[in-house]
Amino acid sequence: MPTRTASCTCGQLSIEVQGAPRGVGLCHCLACQQRTGSVFAALAGFAAPYKIIGSATEYVRTGDQGAKFIFRFCPVCGTNLFHTEEGVSGRVSVAVGAFADPGFPAPQVSVYDCRRHPWVQLPPGAVAFKKDPP
């Protein structure tokens, strides 16, 4: 099973995941736009096991449906690298750009499409949801 490594800008924090992503998606919600400083977040979900190298600072945000997401970022360079959901074990969502791999699989899903900037085009075949699907 292949291992992938995503890391922060300065290299102090990284995460190693195994296998293919369970899914790749875009989130256009305003919280993700502010969190990333971009117009959307591109995330890849992976199953455990995963290995974290370095230290991370945490920020907890409650989503629209009440789930609490624990975002981890590098305390040195500020890169927002990955997050988990409180009370849900065995999976992690990693920022696609942190893999620094232009050949990474394209997103299949787009959530909070109601907040998508009109000039952002989705990949062919991507399924768009107005908000977050239940």
Image (spheres, rainbow, N blue to C red):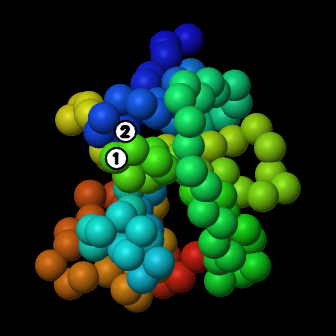
Question: Which residue bears the numbered disc 1?
Answer: 77
Residues at marks 2 and 1 touching, judged by CB atoms closer than 8 Å = yes
In this view, which residue lies farthest toward the left?
Answer: 119
Along the line of sight, the residue nearer the viewer: 111 or 64: 64
Q: Position of residue 22 (x, y in %)?
A: 57, 40
**Tag in front: 2 or 1:** 1
Q: Is residue 64 above or below residue 108?
A: below
Q: How many marks?
A: 2
Residue 126, visible in the rendered structure: yes
Amino acid at pointer 2: Cys
Residue at screen point 38% across, 52% down: 78
Along the line of sight, the residue nearer the viewer: 27 or 110: 27
What number is the disc on residue 9?
none
Question: In the picture, residue 76 is in which quadrant?
Answer: top left
Q: Position of residue 58 (x, y in %)?
A: 61, 55
Q: Is residue 4 above or below residue 74?
A: above
> Counting other residues with Cα less than 10 Å from the Cα at mark 1, is it few (<14), some (14-19), or many (20 or more)?
few
Residue at screen point 36% across, 74% down: 33
Question: In the picture, residue 10 is in which quadrant?
Answer: top left
Query: Position of 128 compared to 123: left or right?
Result: right
Q: Quadrant of the N terminus?
A: top right
Question: In the picture, residue 120 is in which quadrant?
Answer: bottom left
Question: Which residue bears the numbered disc 2?
Answer: 8
Along the line of sight, the residue nearer the viewer: 109 or 55: 55
Q: Position of residue 130 (x, y in %)?
A: 48, 84
Q: Is residue 66 above or below residue 101?
A: below
Label 2's element?
loop
Label 1's element?
loop
Query: Position of 69 compared to 115: left or right?
Result: right
